[in-house]
Amino acid sequence: MTANSSIPVFDNTFLIPNYNLGVQEIQDVVEKLIKQGKAINDQIASVPLTEVSFENVIAPLAIDSNQSMVDYSKVTFLQHVSSSREIRDASMEAEKKLEEFDIECRMRKDVYRVVKALFDAKEKWSDLSSEDKRLLTKTELSYRRDGLNLSQEDSDKLMVLKKRISELSILYGRNISEGDAEALFTKEELEGLPEDFFEGREKKVDGSVEKYVVTTKYPDLFAVLKSADFESTRKTLLLVEERRCKENVPILQEAAKLRLRAAKLLGYKTHAEYVLEDKMAKKVENVLKFEENLQKLLEPLAEKEIKSLVEIKKGLNKKFVDSDDSIYSWDSKYYFRLLKEKLYDIKEEEVKQYFSIDRVTDGLLDTYQKLLGLTFTQENNSLGWHKDALLYKVTDTETKDHVGHFWMDLHPREGKYNHAACWLLRAGYNKNNGTREYPVTAIVANFTKPTNSKPSLLKHDEVVTLFHEFGHAMHNICSKTKWSRFHGVNVETDFVEAPSQMLENWCWEPSVLQGFGKHYITNEPIPESLVKRLVDAKNLGAGLANLRQIFFGMFDMGIHNVETEDIDVNKTYSTLRKSISKVGVGSEQTWPAGTFGHMMGGYDSGYYGYLWSEVFSADMFYNRFKKEGLFSKTAGNDYRYKILGPGGSRDAMESLVAFLGREPDMSAFLKSIGMS
């Protein structure tokens, strides 16, 4: 079953965290976590070196991490979803204090001294499980990578650097979430947009003319870039977006310089070398080789795509065109839409009619239930942060055992995180009393709100986005590890996207689309011919789209794989964008690096991972599910238990080999984007 039509009376058997917190409650939780964490670290530091054991050194740290993660997530997550500015500010301040405390804990040499003694006592490892050994190894490595083997002077320098980087990350994120911008347009200037774009839209008087307010939030921005006929309108809004958060450029630049200083203190040549040490890629050379090789393969395809777009542009009514026959960054989405309509007779407005968010959500839940052997039941959401946030319980379909809970918060509102993402709110782990703590995760998105006359209708790429983020949620739900540190998406960051990318493939399968694609008025199923055209058009623009991803990855390396502090974020961004992306950017001054949240959100020196993991996701899909069946019970169980289940408790490559029966290769990925 999917969501129940009647929601049961609230039952908190599995102790779902309460997100209805006030400012004082948030502050109290922070104080408790700091006090509790300090006590545990003091306790471990006092263990005599001759008496060290896993039980008195590593286990107490891990148990504290198990228990404190829930409270940490609770008070820091609210900055992204609360409707109250006061609560968001308190949540941001909580994250700042807890990040600072975490840095202090990671810099405690007295604790590392004890951990190192156990790490060196290999005779005490014999009775440890593989996950316990991994935890010990990773814990020691974390301290070492944090510089605990440095002199006290250098350790102090490193702590100052890390605290400042943490402050910069929080500030950068706050500026993005609160730095929404807008532009004003007449209805004539918005020619090409569907009528539902205007329903309920705010208006303002500009001079003596009443105009529509169009924001830089994704639903508005993408709608305009894809559908606005006037080039000037598309360009204006994109420039507003790319001039947003100018104050973040020096923040990112400072962070890149401080990361380099920190890496050099630790004995690495560059920040990228430091980051990649514990990733699947291992070395900078492997990343650069991967991206450069793929760039060469993609360039001929991208150049063909540019020529096709230019032909479309040449045939357009000149009243809509301001520039020459080149394709610019504000053009590509629009002309690809027109090309799709010309080649495949696909009009997004027609496609949307079959993808109301309720139907899509039901189809999404049904797909994942069948694929993974799970049952989802909607529950009372009284502990949620907003009425839009819906809560679901997850059980194993066969055994009826409880598996976890997930939240879905899918519509925009003021102050809310304005992209799509998944948060792990509580990791699963084994409790001391032999019972289990079950995971809780949340999907946050910003799909257009329903109006009085229409439900929320999704573009097909938004359907793909929802399936993707739900894939992360299922990684969190299906993971079953002993320690919270390894739960769910806590894997190597260059693998973390692969499981959810793999699950996007069901959005391109005709049988799946026809299962939930129903016209929101007539209830007629989406026509087979439309589905075929949609699937046939899947790889339209794959060359340029993947070059764009390579550009982002190379920009990341461009500011993080450097050996001197002569870093110019804007210049690097502009130069690489022009040389790699193949589309023009105009002569106007912009600073899009100011909204590249990944660079301050944990993906520094790791953005390549999106394409890197696509290779693995394609291999998993084509060589298991395409061969054995989309809903093959064997393939689904293997995916649940061999890929999702282990989380980070073993190397990702080990999980891939267990699932594929061999090491992965690139052939399926090239096939997936229409290349041989």
Image (cartoon, rainbow, N blue to C red):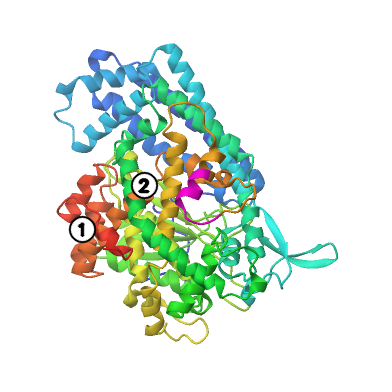
Q: Quadrant of the N terminus?
A: bottom left
Alpha carbon distance from label 2 to label 1: 23 Å
Whether residue 467 is visible to the viewer of this picture, yes or no, is no
In percent of width and height, residue 595 lies at: 56, 46
Q: Secondary structure at mark 1?
A: helix
18 left or right, relative to 82: left
Inspect the image, locate mark 2, and give the three-letter code of the amino acid beneath it.
Gly
* Mark 1 neighbour density, 10 Å: few (under 14) some (14–19) many (20 or more): some
The numbered disc on residue 638 is: 1
Q: Secondary structure at mark 2?
A: helix
Q: What residue is rendered at 61% in x and 57% in y?
A: 238
Which of the pair 452/281 is nearer the observer?
281
Which of the pair 444/309 is nearer the observer?
309
Range of residues picked out in magenta: 575-584
The numbered disc on residue 38 is: none
Q: Quadrant of residue 224?
A: bottom right
Q: Is residue 544 part of the magenta span, yes or no?
A: no
Which of the pair 202/316 is nearer the observer?
316
Which residue was labeled with disc 2? 609
- Vertical position of residue 652 compared to residue 271: above or below: below
327 left or right, relative to 277: right
Inspect the image, locate mark 1, and give the three-letter code of the amino acid beneath it.
Asp
In percent of width and height, residue 193 lies at: 62, 73
Which of the pair 442/51 is nearer the observer?
442
Whether residue 244 is visible to the viewer of this picture, yes or no, is yes
Q: What residue is rendered at 35% in x and 15% in y?
A: 46
Pointer 2 or 1: first along the chain = 2
